[in-house]
Image (tube, rainbow, N blue to C red):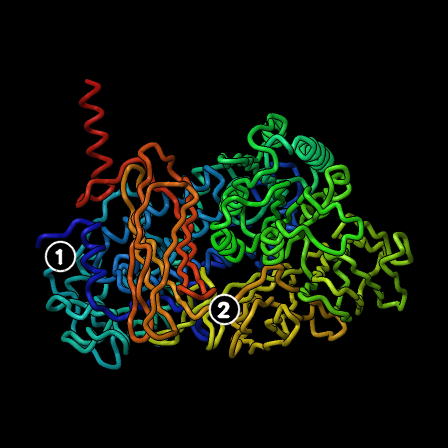
Amino acid sequence: MFQFPFFTTLILLSLTPQLRIQAFNIISASSNTHQNITLTAILQKSAEVCQVVVLKQGRFFVQPKVLTAESVAQACLSPASASSLKEAISDIKNRNAWTDLIHFKDPEYHFDNEEFAAGRGVITQGLSVVKASLKLKNYESAREQLGEILHTLQDFYSHSNWIELGNRSPYANLINPNLPLTNLADKNMPTCSSCDDNCTNNILDTVTSQKLLISGYVSGLKPAGKCSHGGLVDSTSSQEPKGGINKDNSKSPHGYLHLVAADVATAATRDLLEDIRKSTNDTEFLRLLGISSTFSVLCIVIDTSVSMADEIAEVKRVTSSIIDSRRGTTDEPSLYILVPFNDPGFGPVTKTSDAEIFKSKISALSVGGGGDDPEMSLSALWLALAATPAASNIFLFTDAEPKDVEMKSTVLALIESTKSTVNVMLTNPLTNTSRSLSNPINQLYQDLALASGGQAIEVSKELLPNATSLITNSTIFGLVTIFQAVRDPGRSEVFSFLVDSTVGNLTFYITGNSTQFTITAPSGQSQSSVQSVGSLGIIQSVFNLHTVLISTSSPAGQWSISITSAQPYTLKVSGKSPINFKYDFVEVIQNPQPGYAVYKSRPPAGGNVTLLVSLLGSGSGLISELVLVDSSGSGLYKGSLEDQGSGDYLVTVETAPKGDFYIRITGQFNSSTSSKFQRQSSTQYRASNISITAVRNGSWFAGQNFSVPFTVVANSSLREYAVTVRNSGLYNMTFPTSLTAGGNSTANGTVMLSAPANATAGTEVILTIEVTQLGTNDTNYAFLRLAVSGAVAPPAGLELSLWISALTLLISLLNQ
């Protein structure tokens, strides 16, 4: 039988109507799941590698009795890594689940329909991207790709007959393209007999005796005599031969082997992680999984026009101070990023883990270009957001308004997607000594800082050193947001919030003009804004920013702050704590099996909003409540929690606020109600009536075009929508600039990207697809993290192993 080339098969299968392909369940209370398999394998491999590292250092390793993120981090002698380890695992698990939702029509992603060569290609090509991304320290891209290929790898043990053949160890050939796939059943060979209630022995004896490898079919038509995947949602299971062979859960046709398949899938996951480890060093491998001795990121975006000489000198001073004072501590930055800009230029991005390289790049900054005329500040900020890890602090220095205001929506999309915080140092304040008004040209910067939970500080060049302490305070590891509020227009209000016993470095940030406040501690002591030094701490004021550093050694309890101002103001309360939370908006699918996929866009308006929330660094703690907080203070929207185990929760809110909102959780460390804590998102969100789904299919090779199809669904009558697409690599691309959607109409488009032939394997490109309803401010976006796979793609129709062999032979002949 003729076989289609691999990439042609992808296209043809995407056009074939199929039912959703099952896999090890994503959400299940009674069976092992992709989530459990991934979590278990990563914790096991992390502990194993940590043991090697600790013993090499001549220190004592204590094997955890129970593997959790906390116990493994402790055994690694890096207890502060508990949160980042759990966050990395969560990212990998989420991408594993994403594969089941996005690629449910593609049998090669699940080893269905006996697509063994194509399935192995998904794994090995994805594995090369993981290794290349890791080499370039693009950890987030590596984690996403790792989650995807783990889903495919794990499905092999549930969907094929590998376990039925008596195998109890992984099939090593699946992760090694140089090893052949042997004993594959012929596409025309019958493999199953019919079964009804009992499918224990439905695989034919000829298959078992010859040790032939088969898998079940799921598509609407299956070849005569072939096995079906099985289950109520598989239409082929009612075709002769009836039944199925999957082991997805204990009630599956071959559910009696479910736990065995899950155990072998766990071992296979460990083997794949070991293969990645061998391609790098143990430090980088553990960093991929979130275990490190350092964590913070220092990212500077700076205007280099001629009027910025004083600011550049101050940045040099501050960054040198941070680098020199934090060497060897957990607050030492693990990554340094620098993005200069002026007019008309912006970039390039310097991204390094070497402090000396970063200092030399900062020292080499020189001024040039036009004074304080509008500059390309938002384009530079966009590059910085694309280059930094999620939840980073970014500091932008400028004395000019942005020239590229059309970039605002893209920057907002990256702020929401990455949950990063943008702080802006604006050295162009009004000379008005009363400071009753803000400089109006700074409003856009203030909007971006507000959306991210950052500060927009208006300060004179002479007083800039007084404001840059924000950089020092905001780049220490383990900072959490406890409370945040915005009032525009300003009004008098009393805010109350809980500070728990794990919080240190408690700090209040109040921005606004003509703002008066009084802070009251749980003890009843208070301090007003006119007291620079008082019973609670030290107040530092620089134009529109007031920073209150609390000095009490035991801040736990209920705090309050009374603020009076007729002008807009913001309040943020932060501290250092090992307890935090991770959250993502998700789409939950109940049929044909429970599962979810993370939104990389705004949540839907007018209906349920669902979040996947993970408690980080809490040990035995739990979340007791989640609310969406309208940023205007007009209301709270409470969610219902469904505990998923391991500190994960699915939370459903009946409807989102109509305006901007924050996410706030409350919880407790154990069963004691006296040990409560509170955390809040720094990032603001907004729901949208527009839904965008974008899919990254296959591998992207240098020198080749790469297509990203996307779909737009609008909760409105038929209307026209503007489309804007940007990629952080600044690669050439084409896309439709407008689409019509709404009513019962779904609009489809395709972005065609072209990577240059010299693009390095592992190069990360952030793609944003923005859709805006014309005449309104309703907009939504799709956020994709892409990685270039390599310099040359394997010729279509050849297995990678055959292609490598052919290339090796050719080189040998040329050398003769």
Query: Which one is in front, 435 or 633?
Result: 435
Q: Which residue is mark 2?
A: 687
Can residue 84 be seen from the camera position used here? Answer: no
Looking at the image, residue 756 lies above or below residue 526:
above
Query: Which one is in front, 563 or 483?
Result: 563
Dot 1 crowding, Cα within 10 Å, few <14, some 14–19, many 20+:
few
Residue in the image at 48% along x and 49% along y: 140
Looking at the image, residue 202 lies above or below residue 215:
below
Q: Earlier in the sequence, mark 2 or mark 1?
A: 1
Q: Amino acid at mark 1?
A: Asp
SS category of the residue bearing label 2 = loop
Dot 2 crowding, Cα within 10 Å, few <14, some 14–19, many 20+:
many
Can residue 610 be seen from the camera position used here? Answer: yes
The answer to which image quadrant residue 714 occupies is bottom left
Q: Residue furthest top?
A: 816
Which disc is residue 277 wearing? none
The answer to which image quadrant residue 129 occupies is top left
Q: Residue furthest front?
A: 432
SS category of the residue bearing label 1 = loop
Which disc is residue 186 wearing? 1
* Residue 1 location (% of width, % of height): 8, 55
Looking at the image, residue 695 lies above or below residue 392:
below
Q: Amino acid at mark 2?
A: Ala
* Residue 813 location (% of width, % of height): 18, 23
Mark 2 vs mark 1: give the one in front.
2
Position of the C terminus, as image quadrant, is top left
Describe residue 270's horizontal placement relative to residue 111 as left or right: right
